[in-house]
Amino acid sequence: MTSYMPPADRIWWKVPVGRQELVWIAIALVWCLIMFAMMPYWHVYGKQNLSTEAYQTTPEKFGIKVQEMIDKYQVGEEGGIPIVKPPAGSDIYQLGRLWQWWPIFELEKDKSYRLHLSSMDWQHGWSLQPDNINLQIVPGYEMVLKITPDRAGEYGVVCNEYCGIGHHTMVGKIYVRE
């Protein structure tokens, strides 16, 4: 009823709100509160989001950690990329750079590892397939997550953040053995 009034005479907070509008605002508010309460529930019980830690680092410092792990636990090489077999329960390091995930891991089934991820150059997406675990990997930060592979097999790691002309070739591997 106020649309015919000139804007100067209309003060929006004094305009009465219709009953239907109040009902819809109440429904939207209740839905927002339900969704807000569900976020921690899904995080803890839904296992949809991984709990990660993040630390500041530099590409140089992270690269040294990766190389030390490779020097200590390398068991082979595949396509010029080292394969490392670290002991269960240890910290393992994988770096992303144009356009590869370095190194390849050989892990034991049902054993836990602390996986550290970082980028040497651009933002990359670390996506473990076929389990569809996704993390954003940013230079200057080290993402740490606890992993416990529960199925033996070969897993692929792909970059799911466009990182340049060779993005589609940025593929890594993780082997899980019995």
Image (cartoon, rainbow, N blue to C red):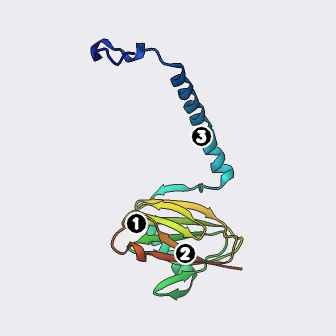
- Residue plotted at (45% across, 87% down): 80
Label 1 element class? helix
Q: Amino acid at mark 1?
A: Pro
Label 2 element class? strand
Q: Nearer the N terminus, badge 3 or badge 2?
A: 3
Q: How many marks?
A: 3
Q: Which residue is mark 2?
A: 156
Q: Amino acid at mark 2?
A: Gly
**Residue 102 appearing in the image:** no
Q: Nearer the viewer, residue 165 or 60?
A: 165
Residue 15 lies, in percent from the top left, at 42, 14
Quadrant of the image containing the C terminus: bottom right
Q: Amino acid at mark 3?
A: Met
Q: Is residue 56 above or below residue 159?
A: above
Q: Is residue 71 above or below residue 31?
A: below
Residue 49 lies, in percent from the top left, at 59, 55
**Residue 40 appearing in the image:** yes
Q: Nearer the viewer, residue 20 or 161?
A: 20
Q: Which residue is mark 3?
A: 35
Q: Few, some or many C-alpha atoms within 10 Å of disc 3 (few <14, some 14-19, many ≥20)? A: few
Q: Is residue 124 above or below residue 31?
A: below
Q: Which residue is mark 1?
A: 59
- Which quadrant would residue 139 be assigned to in this image? bottom left
Mark 2 touching mark 1, by CB under 8 A? Answer: no
Q: Nearer the N terminus, badge 3 or badge 1?
A: 3
Per the model, the C-alpha gap separating discs 3 and 1 is 38 Å
